[in-house]
């Protein structure tokens, strides 16, 4: 039996009829751009995430881009963020002509180190982007306090963290903006690209809403230069069907994470570093990431055994070719560099059975028994 990293067909099967019905509904209405489906989606997402405003956008990347554009981030500005995340977090900063300033991670949680983040602030710092990596919240309190004291904006990259909490509050509403992704591999996945910007600030939410549609209001009068960052009505309709299942799917991921811990303990696999849950949040396990020094050999072994894995991420931002002109030296952020060599994501999706989880752990045990 093979165990893929992710099997979206297993999630789709039980909701197939429901999803096809809403796709048909949108096709019958022929209302593809904004409109009632998107309005209803945004109201439901705001309620789900406990925020005043939710603006549907075309992807998680465009959520970050529109949020930064709404804050007027551009040339001369610095944006402090982790060196260890998906590319969009940093790429959007550079696309706006601002300078990403990278900081190292906490080696235990892989989230950005709050003290190093504060130390990286300069008079040019316009925003800080904490990323809630793998589905666990970053340590926000020190960052929020430092940002508030200096008038710096905080944008949460919550692309991997829908339903994650920090000190009993859902992420996405702590800073100026929260940015979510509905890329199919996220806990709530669209049937293509889609994203969301959240905010509790009425004026900022209005700016992001304008940015999403070329800064246009009223029609053909442009108040600011935005882009086409709109979510498709089809995606909004599909996400409306899937959203009520999210809590159950996340609970299943958490059950699998607990089951992995029990199986690793049972097998006596002390070589494997398991994800560490900090005590101030709800981890949604977008990824279950283990840590092993012999990562590449273990990954090759698992691939040969039919177990799907992935490396999130093999190269930190400061070592990426496209950021060479920022002048970071290899060795600049040793915790992130070690994580890039040692982390490995295992299958964690909710539809995995106990038999699947056993196959994964047995295959890892066989690797260490060689
Ligand atoms: C997925 C992801 C994004 C980008 O989302 P897309 O919808 O793929 O554009 C941004 N940041 C992080 C941390 C992500 O995991």
Image (spheres, grey):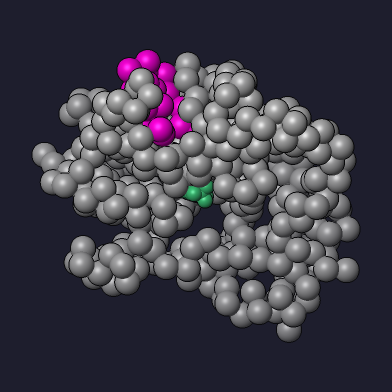
Number of marks in the rendered image:
0
Q: Position of residue 136 (x, y in %)?
A: 54, 41
Most foreground residue, 52 or 21: 21
238 with respect to 315 (left or right): right
**Residue 163 in magenta?**
no
Residue 192 on image: x %, y %: 62, 49
Q: Which residues are magenta?
A: 195-213
> Quadrant of the rendered structure where residue 271 is?
bottom right
The quadrant of the picture occupied by the C terminus is bottom right
Query: Relative to 54, does residue 307 appear above or below in the rendering?
Result: below
Image quadrant containing the N terminus: bottom right
Where, by quadrant of the figure, is residue 20 drawn?
top right
Q: Is residue 271 visible?
A: yes
- For residue 318, above or below residue 21: below
- Magenta region includes residue 203: yes
Q: Is residue 122 visible?
A: no
The residue drawn where x is 70% and y is 79% is 301
Query: Is 330 on the left or on the right of 314, as rendered?
Result: left
User: Whole-percent x and y of residue 47?
Assistant: 59, 18
Q: Is residue 30 left or right of residue 134?
A: right
Residue at image position (65%, 37%) is: 234
Q: Position of residue 318 (x, y in %)?
A: 31, 64
Q: At x 47% / y 20%, what residue is drawn? A: 53
The correct choice, above or below, for 260 with respect to 229 in the image is below
């Amino acid at each position: 039996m093979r165990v893929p990293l992710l099997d979206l067909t297993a999630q789709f099967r039980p909701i197939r009829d429901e999803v096809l019905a809403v796709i048909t509904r949108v096709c019958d209405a022929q209302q593809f751009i904004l409109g009632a489906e998107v309005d209803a989606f945004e109201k439901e997402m705001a309620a789900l995430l406990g925020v005043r405003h939710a603006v549907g956008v075309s992807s998680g990347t465009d959520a970050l881009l529109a949020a930064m554009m709404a804050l007027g981030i551009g040339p001369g500005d610095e944006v402090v963020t982790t060196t260890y995340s998906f590319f969009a977090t940093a790429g959007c900063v550079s696309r706006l002509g601002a300078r990403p300033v990278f900081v190292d991670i906490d080696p235990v949680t892989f989230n950005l180190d709050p003290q190093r983040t504060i130390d990286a602030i300069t008079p040019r710092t316009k925003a800080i982007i904490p990323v809630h990596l793998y589905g666990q919240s970053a340590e926000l309190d020190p960052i929020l306090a430092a940002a508030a004291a200096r008038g710096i904006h905080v944008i949460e990259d919550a692309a991997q963290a829908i339903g994650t909490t920090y000190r009993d509050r859902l992420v996405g509403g702590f800073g100026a903006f929260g940015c979510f992704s509905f890329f199919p591999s996220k806990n709530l996945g669209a049937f293509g690209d889609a994203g969301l910007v959240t905010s509790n600030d009425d004026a900022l939410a209005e700016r992001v809403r304008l940015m999403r549609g070329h800064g246009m209001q009223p029609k053909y009068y442009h108040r600011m230069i935005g882009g086409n960052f709109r979510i498709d009505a089809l995606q909004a309709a599909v996400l409306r069907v899937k959203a009520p299942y999210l809590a159950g799917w996340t609970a299943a991921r958490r059950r699998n994470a607990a089951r992995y811990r029990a199986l690793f303990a049972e097998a006596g696999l002390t070589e494997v570093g398991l994800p560490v849950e900090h005590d101030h949040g709800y981890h949604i396990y977008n990824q279950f990431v283990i840590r092993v020094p012999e990562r590449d050999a273990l990954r090759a072994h698992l691939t040969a055994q039919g177990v799907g894995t992935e490396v999130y991420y093999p190269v930190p931002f400061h070592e990426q070719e496209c950021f060479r002109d920022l002048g970071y030296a290899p060795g600049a952020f040793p915790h992130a560099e070690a994580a890039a060599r040692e982390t490995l994501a295992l299958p964690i999706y909710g539809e995995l059975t106990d038999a699947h989880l056993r196959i994964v752990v047995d295959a890892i045990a066989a690797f260490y028994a060689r």
